[in-house]
Image: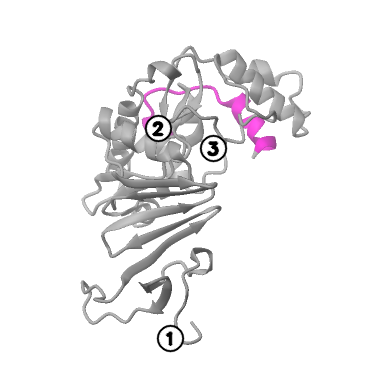
Amino acid sequence: MADPTQGIPFVPWKLQVGETYVNRDGMLFEYTPVGSEELPADGELITVLAIQMGRVLLIRDRSYITKSGPSVRRLEAEAMKLVAKYTSVPAPEVIYTRFNDGHGTIAMTIIPGTTLEKHWEGLDDDDNEIKKSLCRQIWELLSQLRQIPQKPELSHLFQCAADGSHTRDPMIEDFQQPSRPLETDLQLRTRIYERYIRCGGSRYKDQLFDMLPHSSSSVFTHADIAPRNIMVDERHQITGLVDWEYSGWYPDYWEYAQIMRPSCLNRDWQAWMDATAPQKWDLSGINAARRILF
């Protein structure tokens, strides 16, 4: 910050991840704490948690989190409300939302703990029982999500986001606008095949459609379960699942397929999730499509 006495305009995209500022009427100033729990008397304390594609996460006054940006959608808030209503799965509680002119903001409670991504780094080869326990906890939470019912007005859709909107998952996002609804498993498999061909896929051109898994039911799915989106405490207990921006109703194999993505960076965690999975599917078709669509 060039001039600490003058501050800089509060422009979220220009902030530094991990930095803490004092917001005074839209101007940001350096924060010099006197005590670890002390809050500034003349402004709002802001800590930059993350800056991702189209969204900024801020911790405000150490009390709650805001997620804002052009890619923040209503579906994420709706997902967390559904989880709170129908399950005991720990997730952020929605405090308020604001959506207008292509920009969204969701204010939510803070989930305690550290990410499983960091927690797993502290485990070694002698901690197999802890790893097994953590993965079984995750599967138990996911089993609760699968029981969340679809609203009657969405019951004709085989796949949709938590608020009934169309998904932006690159596997099934529609090339056509407006997006065509996915009302059956056949339509979903056809969509994956269409995208594979349109994106230049050729190796499995004649086999891919038959390689894709079939599903007779769609279930509520987080759709982005990864160590970075799971919070854990010091006792190796899951304290919450975060980042619900892809959640909705998907084929019953989708959560497993997402967890087993070849792009997963933590192969040890992935192997343990596979070993403890209550059900498995043949993902050869999904993974063949991913080589082109991701």
In the rendered structure, which amino acid carries the disc numbered 2?
Answer: Ala
Magenta stretch bounds: 274-293
Residue holding disc 2: 275
Marks 2/3: CA distance?
15 Å
Q: Is residue 266 or residue 15 the one in the foreground? A: 15
* Three-letter residue code for mark 1: Pro
The reply to whether the magenta stretch includes residue 42 is no
Q: Position of residue 266 (x, y in %)?
A: 47, 48
Q: Tell which tag, 1 or 3, sits nearer the viewer.
A: 1
* Front: mark 2 or 3: 3
Residue 163 is left or right of residue 59, and the answer is right
Q: Nearer the viewer, residue 196 or 124?
A: 196
Question: In the rendered structure, which disc, 2 or 3, sits on the residue that comes first in sequence?
Answer: 3
Q: Position of residue 257 (x, y in %)?
A: 51, 30
Residue 241 point in image, percent of width and height = 34, 42
CA distance for labels 1 and 2: 53 Å
Residue named by callout 1: 4
Give yes or no for residue 285 being in the magenta stretch. yes
Asked whether the viewer can see residue 125, the reply is no
Indicate which label's residue lies in the foreground, 1 or 2.
1
Taking the image as shown, residue 4 lies to the left or right of residue 14, namely left
Q: Is residue 259 above or below residue 16?
A: above
Say if residue 183 shows up in the picture: yes
Element type at mark 3: loop
Q: Which comes before the other along the chain, label 1 or label 2?
A: 1
Callout 3, which amino acid?
Answer: Arg
Residue ID for mark 3 = 261
